[in-house]
Each structure stands twice: as C-alpha cells, then as structure tokens.
Image: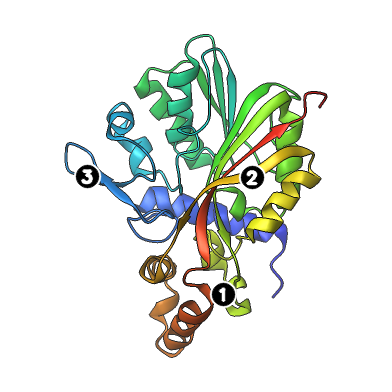
Amino acid sequence: MERTEERIKEQVRERYTAAVTGGDSCCGTKTSCCGTEAKLPEGRVVSAAGYTQEQLISLPADAIANSFGCGNPVAFAGVLAGETVVDIGSGAGIDCLLAGQKVGRDGRVIGIDMTPVMIEKARKNARNAGLSNVEFRLGDAENMPVENGVADWIVSNCVINLSPNKLRVFQEAHRVLKPGGKLSISDIVVEHMPWPLSRSAALHCACIAGAISESKYLEAMRQAGFQDARVTERIYYDRDEVFGLIEGAKLFGHRFLSGFYRYLVDHYVAGKIWSARIVATKGATG
C-alpha cells in the first residue's frame, strides 16, 4: 500500500511517542541514531554525539535520556546572547536548553515538535532547568507555527530526514529566518538505499529509509533560497553501527527475511550512510 505523507507523519509520531513512553529510542534500542554513547556521573548510558560532559551535567536527565539525535547542532553554531533560535523537531528539548543557556535572558528559543508527549516532556525539562527563555510549540516542520523573519538561527538534529517533503521544510526555515539568519543542522544522509529498505516504515522511523543523498539535501536547501549550503563534517557509520540501527527497527526478527536484509546492508548500505553537519545562510535581502 502506498505510504502517503500524512501516514508517514503519523507513523513517526506513533514511534516517537512509544520511544519516550516505553524507554526505547527512535532506533528501537537504548542507542540513538548517532550510535555513540557517553556516561553521566550517576552511570547512566546516554546518547551524546558531540555533547560534552559539562553540557550534559548542566541539563535535566530526562532531556538527555530522551535525546534521539545524531549530532550537536548548537555546538558548532555561533549562537550569541540576545539572539532567537528555532529548533525543528525539538524532542525532549536537549538542544533548546543548550541554546537557551547561550542566548541568555535577552534571547529566545522556540522548539517545534509534532509529538504531544515530547512537548510535555520538553516543557517540564525547561522548567527543571530554570530556563524561562525557552518555549515549545506543537507543530509540523512543514508548516511551522512561527511568524515570519524572527529567527537568527534555525537548528535541527536528526529530524529533517523523517520529513516526506524536505523542500517544504527548508522553505519554512527560510521564511522563519531573518535576512542574514543561519541554519545549523545535524542529519542522516545516505548515498544509496535499496528499494526493499527504503519502503520500510520501521526504517523510516529509525532515520534511515527517509534519508536522501547529500547532494539532493543541499540542492533542496538551495531551491528553498539558502546560500552557501555546505557540509562541514561527516561521521560515517560502519557495518556494525548500521546493523544496530536496523536490528533496532526489528527487521532482523523475521527468520526468512533476516539474511536478505543483512545482504543488502553488507553490499549496498554499509559505508554509504553518515551523519552530516550542514550549514547555510539566508541572504541579507531575504
């Protein structure tokens, strides 16, 4: 059956609701899409692609435990005090809280997420972090509930790959940014995805099947009006890490299909999927 855009969004919403209420990540395991781990002082193992121990210690444990990203987009963004930051797909709020610390009392952070339970968690985490300059709005990345030209920065962490209409997301990001505003993204890209895997709803929710090539990603940003769109860093996933993502999506649980999926990963996916750090700028004239 053809998967419509609305059905894809509903499947993603259901999967992430289950992730935060059932303890699994977007990949179906305790590991995030980034596949890397760090430990808090109390010994909890958490996803932390690029997050420093100092950053993690400063945040509520729930914001960390429910972080499903593939990077730290705020870390390599030049966010300054007094600026406005919008986070596309803010989840439980980890990147918004870090941005809130950077922009200070005179700044503003707006997190957008389409999953109600994530919004609830994020608002609680902001309260626990004592950050009154951070707010969260329920909404769609393809139709953001944010007024025109208000953001100095837009950040996003392993979310845009989930969208069935990425060009529309970038058009919305361009609308929301001020002239001269900047985009800072961590996301999954893939050089090639075999058809049987690309049609998997479970793999879409695990940040794989919905990923597109780096060239298509950058081209969509340029079509939306962004300038100087480029990749600043790549973190490649090896065979075992890709297997971990797919095992988390429970595709290997079927005895008859397991060998087939493993063959596809070995020959067509391993070494061809990575987390990219991507930046771009909105022109000064808008």
Q: Which residue position holds label 2?
A: 230
Name the element at disc 1: helix
Q: Report, in whole angstroms, how far the alpha carbon at label 1 lies from the one at label 3.
A: 32 Å
User: In front: mark 2 or mark 1?
Assistant: 2
Mark 3: give few (<14), some (14-19) or many (20+) Cα within 10 Å. few
Q: Report, in whole angstroms, how far the alpha carbon at label 2 lies from the one at label 3.
A: 35 Å
Q: Which residue position holds label 3?
A: 44
In the image, residue 116 sits, relative to residue 257, either above or below, namely above
In the image, residue 42 sits, relative to residue 257, either above or below, namely above
The answer to whether the residues at label 1 and label 3 have Cβ atoms under 8 Å apart is no
Camera-nearest residue between 215 and 123 = 215
Residue at the limit of the structure toward the right, as seen here:
285
Residue 169 sits in which quadrant? top right
Q: Which residue position holds label 1?
A: 197
User: In front: mark 2 or mark 3?
Assistant: 2
Q: Which of marks 2 and 3 is nearer the N terminus?
A: 3
Residue positioned 43% across, 87% down in the render: 259
- Total residue callouts: 3
The image shows residue 53 at horizontal and vertical percentages of: 27, 34
Residue positioned 43% across, 48% down in the render: 68
Camera-nearest residue between 133 and 106 = 106
